Amino acid sequence: MTKTGVLLMAYGTPRSQEEILPYYTDIRRGRPPTPELLAELTARYDAIGGISPLAQRTESQRDELQRQLDALEPGRYSVRLGLKHAHPMIEETVEDFARDGYTELVALVLAPHFSSYSIGQYVGRAREAATPHGISVTGIDSWATEPAFIEFIASDMKKRLPSMPSDTRVLFTAHSLPQRIIDGGDPYPNELRSTAEAVSSSIGLREGSQWSIAWQSAGRTPEPWIGPDILAVIDELAEAKSTSAVLVSACGFVADHLEVLYDLDIEAKAHAEKHGLAFDRTACVNDDSEVMRALAHRVTAVCA
């Protein structure tokens, strides 16, 4: 049997407060943050308990994907993490696979929506690192409408909506990207829309009056980022008096981390409540066995 490596890629996160500075520096392409920026980011981590649970969540996703693959084809696959901004970096993990004699890798990103700026960059880094070793890399570009993923979101949404006001507005969100990426023809907004439409269709929500799309967590750069931002959407809903509650589905994120636990659960919630709007959020996938099983099937399908 040919052993196949599964390079499971994710953004990465600091594991301790001491790692925040090198992590932030890497995000800024080697430029250390100002003391003010570092203090602000550290304060955000303090607000969610001192550090993000993302590292543990990502490792649990890796372990669950390994279990699901072992159940399908015992002994064939080895799942290892490669991170964008923390260790083990993508390149480090490819080197590990090379040392262990692997010649085939499947590159899977823990993000459902394809963008050349995100998933495209991850898979590109994997291929660049693998080429000198003669390792082939097969990328899984998108799982935005994976039925198990859609069912996970829809099921949780159906549980929450009955306890909320009848005029609740559902907001589907994902991480914003620079507008220039989209202007170049990137499919990212359509990817998010495909998820939103699949979920809303499955539970009978009408676009415009019952659900819409917002963006969040835009970077602090001079250039414009995709909008509308979720805080601006909340302002508009409050001004129009068209709803008394918002239910956010952060379907662009598949694990609890800073952009969910702070940007939504603290910042967006406080913003909504300031306007007198009730606020709730659907759960993140984390290591849900059904979703991980579906991703395992996607891995085996590209290796068939």
Image (cartoon, helix red, strand yellow):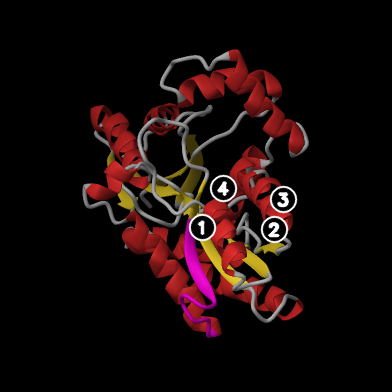
Q: Which x, y percent locates residue 70?
A: 54, 57
Q: Which x, y percent locates residue 97?
A: 41, 34
Q: Nearer the viewer, residue 188 or 285?
A: 188
Query: Does the image show residue 250?
Result: no
Q: Nearer the viewer, residue 278 or 197?
A: 278
Left or right of 302? Residue 277 is right
**Which three-letter amino acid code belongs to the residue tagged 3?**
Ala
At 63% across and 41% down in the image, what residue appears? 258
- Which mark sits nearer the N-terminus, 4 or 3? 4
Q: Secondary structure at mark 3?
A: helix
In the picture, the quarter occupied by the C terminus is: bottom left
At 55% across and 65% down in the image, what residue appears? 171
Q: Which residue is mark 3?
A: 270
Q: Which x, y percent locates residue 59?
A: 61, 43
* Circle 1 Cα neighbour tier, 10 Å, few/some/many (<14 / 14–19 / ≥20): many
- The label shown at residue 275 is 2
User: Residues under labels 2 and 1: Cα distance?
Assistant: 20 Å
**Which three-letter amino acid code belongs to the residue tagged 2?**
His
Q: Secondary structure at mark 2?
A: loop
- Which mark sits nearer the N-terminus, 1 or 4? 4
**Which three-letter amino acid code belongs to the residue tagged 1?**
Thr
- Which mark sits nearer the N-terminus, 2 or 3? 3
Left or right of 26? Residue 276 is right
